[in-house]
Image (spheres, grey):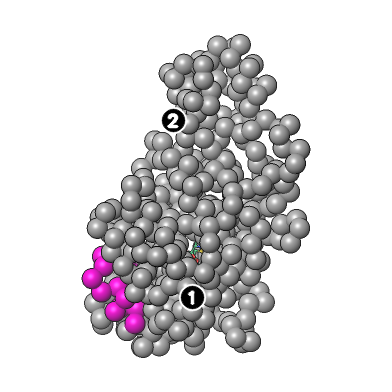
Amino acid sequence: MNAVTNNVRRSPPAKLPADSAARRPPLSGVPLDELVSLLAPIPAFRVKQIFLWLRRGAASFFEMTDIPLAAREELNVRWALRSTNLAGVKAGDSAQKAQILLEDGVIIEAVLLIDGAGRKTACLSTQAGCPVRCVFCKTGGLGFKRSLNSSEIVEQYYHLKHLSGGEISNIVFMGMGEPLLNLDELRRAVLVLSHGFSLRRITVSTCGIIEGIYELAAGWPAVRLAVSVPSARQQLRNRLMPGCAGHTLEQLKAALYKYQAECKHRITLETVLLGGVNTSEQDAGALAEFAGGLSVMVNLIPWNPAGGLLFEGQPLSSPGRSEVARFRQFLEARGIKAELRRRKGTAISGACGQLGVLPDGY
Ligand code: SAH
Ligand code: SF4
């Protein structure tokens, strides 16, 4: 495996307050095989029934009517179903943003996106804040509070499912934080969420954490991968994503080759377009060259305004329509198919890069 060359490191799992030992730990984020050991001597077939209730989003152990009452009472004394609460909702035309209160007072955000065909996508967060600090991203601008545990990740899905009033068709880890800096808890959350939900409909988006991509390639549940490449020019990438400056685009590409060789999935390259910064023909040429040899889809995301963010002292701006169209043509002239991501959620600050409530203690 390549050396780990990112500037940022994995962060420790969530630290709960000192009195949390007295709290009943939540079961929402525990994968089935762990749950069987955790709840022994309850027989495995009963634990599976409990897991299925949890996975359907049960609100109380007493709803689990196929479990003997005595067992339900005992479970209720020792364990909680969940650890988070919905603190607020902002609703827009094609998006709803949930603000979720964690046990230690931190508030995180998750977004339900609804496309033209009515399909619903849950956009989940994996960290409170983000240590990578990309200059164009509001979450990065907040700094980093802590990583989320698997219950806190899984419960965002249940809160959004409740808001959606129906089925969710896709899950994307594109909310607050860098998923591959929280791999162990993300893996546990994926194991829970993918029960009865196809892995093909789960996408993890990374800024390009090399070690994490190799780990995904080596025997992870086969989730889809999206990689943020705001610039495929090394110097500009380093300036836009200082937290990624410790590795090269060459190392990133080698990791993506390995992922693709193992997982066979097409990779999405996500390019946030910043007016006058990364939209030239040279930028498109570099991106096309980076994509060469990989099976990719390029997703162009015109920058969503996030107040107060500066790039080397200058305010950032969204690119104009013609600037976006030209960039796309430059790519297509080089044989790279690119899709424009339709803006969703900007009205409620719930679009890519706009998430971030100032949690307690910031
Ligand atoms: N940390 C992960 C996932 C969360 S960010 C990552 O970086 O991939 C999800 C996507 O939002 C990334 O592609 C990122 O480049 C993009 N993004 C961040 N800030 C943005 C903004 N203000 N406007 C548009 N896209 C943004
Ligand atoms: Fe973190 Fe992703 Fe935002 Fe960069 S774009 S600061 S990696 S959340």
Vertical side of 285 occupied by 40: above or below: above
Question: Callout 1 environment at 10 Å: few (<14), some (14 to 19), or many (20+)?
Answer: many
Residue at 60% in and 86% down:
312
Vertical side of 314 occupied by 339: above or below: above
Residue 118 location in percent, x, y?
A: 44, 51
Disc 2 and disc 1: Cα gap in Å? 38 Å
Can you identify the residue that label 2 sits on?
33
Q: Secondary structure at mark 1?
A: loop
Q: Secondary structure at mark 2?
A: helix
- Considering depth in this image, is 184 or 195 the residue closer to the camera? 184
Q: Which mark is residue 245?
A: 1
Residue 168 location in percent, x, y?
A: 46, 44
Amino acid residing under circle 2 = Asp
Residue 244 location in percent, x, y?
A: 49, 71
Q: Is residue 9 visible?
A: yes
Cβ at disc 1 under 8 Å from ligand 2 = no
**Which range of residues does the magenta coloring cover?**
286-298
Residue 58 location in percent, x, y?
A: 56, 29
- Considering depth in this image, is 78 or 355 the residue closer to the camera? 78
